[in-house]
Image (tube, rainbow, N blue to C red):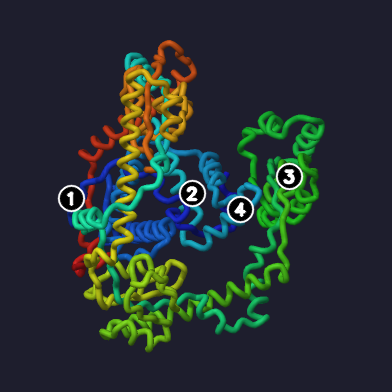
């Protein structure tokens, strides 16, 4: 079944494509460290090995994923300091343990399940959303695992998923629990909400200097100078070198020829195939299908195969030529959609083919991609040159050189800034505009200290940078004269908030005395928002009210006729609420929502079962960890 998918494919490292499919439910206590594990293995779990090479690749992939997620450079030592190496090992141990338990119970996956799982991988879909054998082959060939090994891993993953799914298959939900939670989460409230914006307070006049002076002295730690640093930054990217890279027309043409498979994609067809020992049987089969019978039905009637056993999947004309012969390939690719071929004599008998889908090929000419290839070739060569520069820089750094000395020796552009804050501003409040641009490296500059050893770091876009901190200018108290404008602004903000809070409190008291909400809102310069159906928001299918959770909690804490207040979620003022009605869920029970809640509770119960299962498994698992090999792999004994 998988022959048509595997044809022509060599290798792919499965973790690069699928990742770790099962996340760790809890942190493993990796304290069971023993020395009885094979030297090339990171751990042994229930008799199954976790090879060091596979473990290290998984670690590298996780670091790369984090760099892409956060848009910053994370080197190996930083990742280790975060405990990432332990987390990856924990997850691989967990995954391997599940695999072994699934194997113990004899669970496996059929060829069809494996093929379907591979076809559903988004990375293997073309622009039209169809499975692409070309993309599959490209990924496999570029990464280092045989297609057979990849499919075995997918088969193991499916078995593990089936095993885990079976653990939570039974989801009994007690009726008492269901009814109680439905009543709690299904209850709704009606409330009048009055906003009191800060702007309703009006203009705040400046107080006497003595008031501001006293405020300044009471809050002096809020009026400090920013922390500044004197730093040097050196940075270089492939784009810096590309203008110097010569790329000839012959180079571009050669690269186009090398990538021809990317630019010239042949037509593929989804093909079904059956073989008969005699031409007479094959012709009878063909005649029945052409008379209107379904291909799969006739297969079942005339052979021992089922309709699902005859699919070749998506194939090119060359695939058919390689697997059968040129006559068969020509016949298949001359067919109209839904048609069957005449019997074609092959190596094992008489072959009949049917085409169930046609996917057109595409061609990008040399002129279409000429400039793109030129840029890509120039960038690739620039990256190669950068690698040589990086090696040279590392050698100079190892000699104890400063950043400026390394930059001078290697030609990496560098700049020194005498005083800069975290925000990139100098003490005069101007943005520091220098070359190279230091803004991408300020996070590192304010993490390092003058004692931090110089290191060449990767930028995440194939570039390199260095940061050296010379001096740290600590925050210092400002004088009242220096901070007077900030003091006045902060005092006004606090005074405006205090007055708005007093207004809101007065509205609360008036509401509880029976005053009309609309009149109070108008008098306060605010707005009235009547909410007839505020819900806790946790019932399946319930629509959120758009209110903050703090305000919802306030409404549900009040009795009918009782009022209260909260600061607005965006700190733009205050909101006063008075609960006007309580609607019990039992009075308007919805069978569909009740069933959705039951399903959700069942999932939660299943998750609880999984946690309990894992706890029990962790207590009994046979686990050996090669601590010595892991410490050597990551140079942990050399860590400070």
Q: Check contact, mark 2 vs mark 1: CB within 8 A.
A: no
| Residue that carries the numbered disc 2 in the rendered image | 151
| Residue that carries the numbered disc 4 in the rendered image | 133
Residue 396, percent across and down? Answer: 32, 85
- In front: label 1 or label 4: 1
Which image quadrant: the C terminus?
A: bottom left
Q: Check contact, mark 1 vs mark 3: CB within 8 A.
A: no
First along the sequence among labels 4 and 2: 4
| Residue that carries the numbered disc 3 in the rendered image | 350
Disc 2, SS: helix
3D distance between C-alphas at marks 2 and 1: 34 Å
First along the sequence among labels 2 and 3: 2
Crowd class of label 4 (few under 14; some 14 to 19; many from 20; radius 10 Å): many
First along the sequence among labels 1 and 3: 1
Q: Quadrant of residue 208?
A: bottom left
Q: Is residue 225 above or below residue 278?
A: below
| Residue that carries the numbered disc 1 in the rendered image | 31
Q: Check contact, mark 1 vs mark 4: CB within 8 A.
A: no
3D distance between C-alphas at marks 2 and 3: 30 Å
Q: Quadrant of residue 387?
A: bottom left
- In front: label 2 or label 3: 2
Residue nearest the observer in this picture, 363 or 52: 363
Crowd class of label 1 (few under 14; some 14 to 19; many from 20; radius 10 Å): few
First along the sequence among labels 1 and 4: 1
* Any part of residue 274 in sight: yes
Q: Quadrant of residue 259?
A: bottom right
Q: Is residue 161 above or below residue 624?
A: above
- The residue depicted at 44 percent of the width and 18 percent of the height is 594
* Any part of residue 599 in sight: no
């Amino acid at each position: 079944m998988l022959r048509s998918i595997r044809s022509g494919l060599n290798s792919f490292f499965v973790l690069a494509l699928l990742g770790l499919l099962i996340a760790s439910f809890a942190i493993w206590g990796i304290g069971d460290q023993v020395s009885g594990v094979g030297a090339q293995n990171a751990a042994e779990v229930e008799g199954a090995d976790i090879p060091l090479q596979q473990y290290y690749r998984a670690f590298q992939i996780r670091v790369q994923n984090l760099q892409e997620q956060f848009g910053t450079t994370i080197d190996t030592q930083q990742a280790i300091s975060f405990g990432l190496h332990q987390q990856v090992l924990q997850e691989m141990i967990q995954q391997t343990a599940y695999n072994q338990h699934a194997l113990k119970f004899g669970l496996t996956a059929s060829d069809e399940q494996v093929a379907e799982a591979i076809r559903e991988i988004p990375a293997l879909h073309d622009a039209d959303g169809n499975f692409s054998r070309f993309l599959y082959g490209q990924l496999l060939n570029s990464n280092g695992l045989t297609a057979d090994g990849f499919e075995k891993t997918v088969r193991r993953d499916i078995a593990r998923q089936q095993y885990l799914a079976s653990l939570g298959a039974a989801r009994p939900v007690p009726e008492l629990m269901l009814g109680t939670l439905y009543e709690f989460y299904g209850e709704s409230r009606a409330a009048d909400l009055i906003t009191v914006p800060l702007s309703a307070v009006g203009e705040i006049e400046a107080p006497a200097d003595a008031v501001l002076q006293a405020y300044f002295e009471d809050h002096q730690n809020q009026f400090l100078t920013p922390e500044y640093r004197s730093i040097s930054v050196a940075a270089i990217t492939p784009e810096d070198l590309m203008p110097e890279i010569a790329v000839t027309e012959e180079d571009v043409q050669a690269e186009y020829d090398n990538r021809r498979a990317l630019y010239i994609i042949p037509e593929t067809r989804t093909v079904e195939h059956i073989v008969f020992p005699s031409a007479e049987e094959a012709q009878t089969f063909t005649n029945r299908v052409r008379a209107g019978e379904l291909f799969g039905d006739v297969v079942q009637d005339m052979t021992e195969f089922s309709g699902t056993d005859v699919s070749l999947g998506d194939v090119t004309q060359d695939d058919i030529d390689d697997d059968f012969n040129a006559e068969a390939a020509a016949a298949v690719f001359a067919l109209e959609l839904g048609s069957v071929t005449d019997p074609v004599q092959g190596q094992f008998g008489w072959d009949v083919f049917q085409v169930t889908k046609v996917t057109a090929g595409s061609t990008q000419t040399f002129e279409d991609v000429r400039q793109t290839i030129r840029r890509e070739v120039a960038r690739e060569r620039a990256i190669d040159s950068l690698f040589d520069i990086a090696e040279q820089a590392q050698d100079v750094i190892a000699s104890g050189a400063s950043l400026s000395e390394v930059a001078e020796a290697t030609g990496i552009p560098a700049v020194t800034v005498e005083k800069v804050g975290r925000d990139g501003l100098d003490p005069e409040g101007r943005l520091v505009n220098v070359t190279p641009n230091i803004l991408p490296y300020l996070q590192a500059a304010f993490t390092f200290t003058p004692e931090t050893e110089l290191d060449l770091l990767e930028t995440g876009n194939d570039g390199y940078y260095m940061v050296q901190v010379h001096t740290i200018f600590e925050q210092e108290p400002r004088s009242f004269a220096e901070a007077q404008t900030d003091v006045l602004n902060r005092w006004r903000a606090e005074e405006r908030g205090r007055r708005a809070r007093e207004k809101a409190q007065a509205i609360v008291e008036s509401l509880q005395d029976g005053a009309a909400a609309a009149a109070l809102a108008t008098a306060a310069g605010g707005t009235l928002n009547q909410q007839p159906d505020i819900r806790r928001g946790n019932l399946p299918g319930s629509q959120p009210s758009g209110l903050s959770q703090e305000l919802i909690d306030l409404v549900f804490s009040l009795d009918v006729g009782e009022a209260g207040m909260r600061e607005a979620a965006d700190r733009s003022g205050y909101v006063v609420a008075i609960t006007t009605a309580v609607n019990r869920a039992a009075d308007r029970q919805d069978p569909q929502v009740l069933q959705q809640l039951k399903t959700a509770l069942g999932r939660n119960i299943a998750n609880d079962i999984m946690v309990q299962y894992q706890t029990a498994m962790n207590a009994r698992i046979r686990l050996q960890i090669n601590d010595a090999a892991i410490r050597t792999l990551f140079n942990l004994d050399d860590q400070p």
